[in-house]
């Protein structure tokens, strides 16, 4: 029928081609993340009191490594399979939130430094890690949601997203109390007015984690419903998949 909407069967090759391009895009983001990590490590090597253990204790660095691994896995699924498993959608959403929060927190720290007349240098590697990669990761995540090939991201992701940050927080607070160093100023009682100050900042970050995750899950599910409704044949429109299945030539 002229002007009728394409069936989902007609869109399969186009969607799979889009998934392959998305897989390539994920690989490129992972490569950029690795380059930024190497550049940032080389940058901090020039600090007089640099400690390798401290570098790898930053949430940004740990979430960046998680992003590289997750993007690699997601790229392989996009390039080699027609759809991702449910667990990968959960993992991709969580890691996307982690890199976004890293960028938000870094932006807050830079803003705080400027209000206190403290000049904070932001090298290219930090710009890539905290701003460019999070933006690209969000684009990749959004494109996947628009395609709506994979299962919807479940609401349970809102709970799962807090597991890693909670473990990291406990580790960081215990380590900081032992060595007298914290990766972020708001975890140091001496800089925020005691334990209450630390708790308030942690609560703020918790709200950011939960809000971002809930927002992404809601957006994913909304885009998924729209895409599926768009692909569904209109009432009275012949489903070509059904015709092929019922064709006598195919039944011989």
Image (spheres, grey):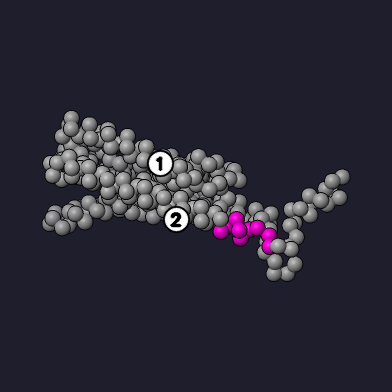
Where does residue 94 sit, x and y in percent of width and height? 41, 44
Residue 159: image tag:
1
- Of residue 85 and residue 195, the one placed in the foreground of this image is 195
Residue 69 within the segment the image draws in magenta: no
Where does residue 179 sit, x and y in percent of width and height? 17, 31
Considering the numbered disc 1 on the image, is that residue within a helix, a strand or a loop? helix
Where does residue 248 sit, x and y in percent of width and height? 86, 50
Name the side, left or right, on which 149 lies relative to 50: right
Label whose residue precedes the other's in the sequence (2 or 1):
2
- Callout 1 environment at 10 Å: few (<14), some (14 to 19), or many (20+)? few
Per the image, the residue denoted by label 2 is 139
Q: Residue at horizontal 55%, vertical 43%?
A: 84
Name the side, left or right, on which 162 lies relative to 7: left
Where does residue 216 sit, x and y in percent of width and height? 43, 52
Q: Residue at horizontal 37%, vertical 51%?
A: 211
Q: Quadrant of the N terminus?
A: bottom right
Q: Residue furthest bottom?
A: 3
Q: Residue at horizontal 74%, vertical 53%?
A: 241
Q: Is the residue 145 above or below the residue 176 in the image?
A: below
Q: Quadrant of residue 98?
A: top left
Q: Is the residue 58 above or below the residue 236 in the image?
A: above
Q: Please, what is the dominant secondary structure of the magenta stretch? A: helix
Considering the numbered disc 2 on the image, is that residue within a helix, a strand or a loop? helix
Q: Quadrant of the C terminus?
A: top right
Q: Spatial distance from mark 2 to mark 1, Cα to Cα?
A: 23 Å
Q: Is residue 67 visible?
A: no
Q: Residue at horizontal 45%, vertical 42%?
A: 156
């Amino acid at each position: 029928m002229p002007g009728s909407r394409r069936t989902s069967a007609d869109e399969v090759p186009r969607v799979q081609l889009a998934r392959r391009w998305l897989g390539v895009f994920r690989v490129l983001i992972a490569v950029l993340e690795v380059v930024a990590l190497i550049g940032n490590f080389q940058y901090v090597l020039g600090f007089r009191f640099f400690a390798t253990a401290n570098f790898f204790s930053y949430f940004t660095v740990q979430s960046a490594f998680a992003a590289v691994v997750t993007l690699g896995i997601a790229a392989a699924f996009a390039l080699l399979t027609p759809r991702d498993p449910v667990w990968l959608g959960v993992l991709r959403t969580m890691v996307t939130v982690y890199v976004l929060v890293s960028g938000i927190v870094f932006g807050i720290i830079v803003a705080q430094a400027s209000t206190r007349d403290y000049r904070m240098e932001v090298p290219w590697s930090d710009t890539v890690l905290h701003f460019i990669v999070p933006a690209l990761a969000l684009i990749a995540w959004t494109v996947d949601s628009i395609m709506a090939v994979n299962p919807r991201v479940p609401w349970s992701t809102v709970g799962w997203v807090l597991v890693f940050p909670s473990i990291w927080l406990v580790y960081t607070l215990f380590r900081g109390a032992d060595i007298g160093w914290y990766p972020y100023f708001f975890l140091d009682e001496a800089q925020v007015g005691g334990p209450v100050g630390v708790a308030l900042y942690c609560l703020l970050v918790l709200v950011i984690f939960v809000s971002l995750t809930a927002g992404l899950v809601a957006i994913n599910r909304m885009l998924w419903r729209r895409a599926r409704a768009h692909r569904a044949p209109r009432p009275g429109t012949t489903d070509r998949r059904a015709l092929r299945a019922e064709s006598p030539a195919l039944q011989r």
